[in-house]
Amino acid sequence: MRLSTLGSVATLALLSTTVIAVAQSRNTIQVAGSSTVLPFASIVAEEFGNAFPDFNTPVVGSGGTGGGFRQFCEGVGDNTIDIANASRRISAAEIATCNTNGVTQIIEVMFGYDGIVFATPVSQGDFALEPVHVYKAIAAQVPVDGALVANPYTSWDQIDPSLPAQAINLVVPASNHGTREVFQLNVVDAGCEEAGLPEDLSAEAATAACTTFRQDGRVVEIAGDYTETLARLQTTPSSVGVFGLSFYEENRDTLKVATVAGVEPTLETVASGEYPVSRPLYFYVKGEHIGVIPGIEEYVAFFLSDGMAGAGGRLEDAGLIPAPAEELAAALAGFDGRAYITP
């Protein structure tokens, strides 16, 4: 019995040593996730490599928020990423998956804000959108004369005469993107409520009416990053695409944005909360890799520094809406204090 116990302890110690040794065989920070956060993290990684020559430049990939969390939660060790970029908060189900796979030291870092915009090629009509317009354009079924019917709308002016007489073609993020969750909640769900569903619908049917998109070719869901959405608009110029404000700012020579609820999306209107479709941006750090993969602590502090995420920093120049200084300070304090997320 004693020999068996000692053998188990030795095995566990060997496994632990093996995990650490494997992790130590990699000396470059690995980051993946949100396509919205991608350009910001790429800037920080490049500047970090220049400012800290003792560390390798971090490798930053995309894959969407959901894809980043899947990689992040695969486990601990050399073959798993250190940081997941996200345009929404990690879900309870994702935390549970992480924990099941041994990732229990998850640190959330909020570093700024972004808006979600509706953009068209500059050659197209001007859009003044309300959430109900978007819902009626995108839903598989919509209420007409008190009944839920297959979506009859084929052009925007059929929904509202104030909108352009332009064919309905929407290019939206797929479910692997954090942008999709905010788009659904702040725009589609809000528009569904405003449209007024039939009162005799069950709760299940009402949810389906708000969340099921039409499948007649007028809605394209993009699993890739915003460059793929932009390519769709170039191929089909009548399309309306959903982007992060920061991506639009980088491409405003070819794109123009719609107002939403009468408000134009700008750095100022998003920062003030006047623009209704905005969200915080995050990255998540795997605590088990801190002190094992070189440079993680320095990378986080550098990301949250005034020169990067602060007002007037490099990321604001790239389109980030900076968080107030006290929020950035709280984020760094949470990281330094190892404020791990609990289920």
Image (cartoon, helix red, strand yellow):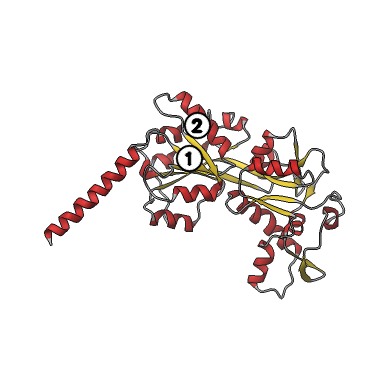
Residue at the farthest bottom position? 200
Q: Is residue 134 above or below residue 314?
A: below
Residue located 58% across and 36% down the image: 39
Residue located 62% across and 52% down the image: 174
Residue in front for this viewpoint, 56 or 310: 56
Q: Secondary structure at mark 1?
A: strand
Amino acid, disc 2 = Ala
The quarter of the image holding the C terminus is bottom left
Q: 160 left or right of 85?
A: right
Image quadrant in which you'd find residue 120: top right
**Callout 1 crowding tier (Cα within 10 Å): few <14, some 14–19, many ≥20:** many
**First in sequence: mark 1 or mark 2?**
1
Q: Secondary structure at mark 2?
A: helix
Q: 26 left or right of 198?
A: left
Amino acid, disc 1 = Val
Q: Disc 1 to disc 2, how far (Cα)?
A: 10 Å
Q: Is residue 32 above or below residue 314?
A: below
Q: Is residue 119 visible?
A: no
Residue labelled with disc 2: 45
- Looking at the picture, how far across and down is residue 54, in whole percent? 39, 25
Residue located 70% across and 41% down the image: 231
Residues tagged 1 and 2 counted as in contact (Cβ below 8 A): yes
Residue labelled with disc 1: 31
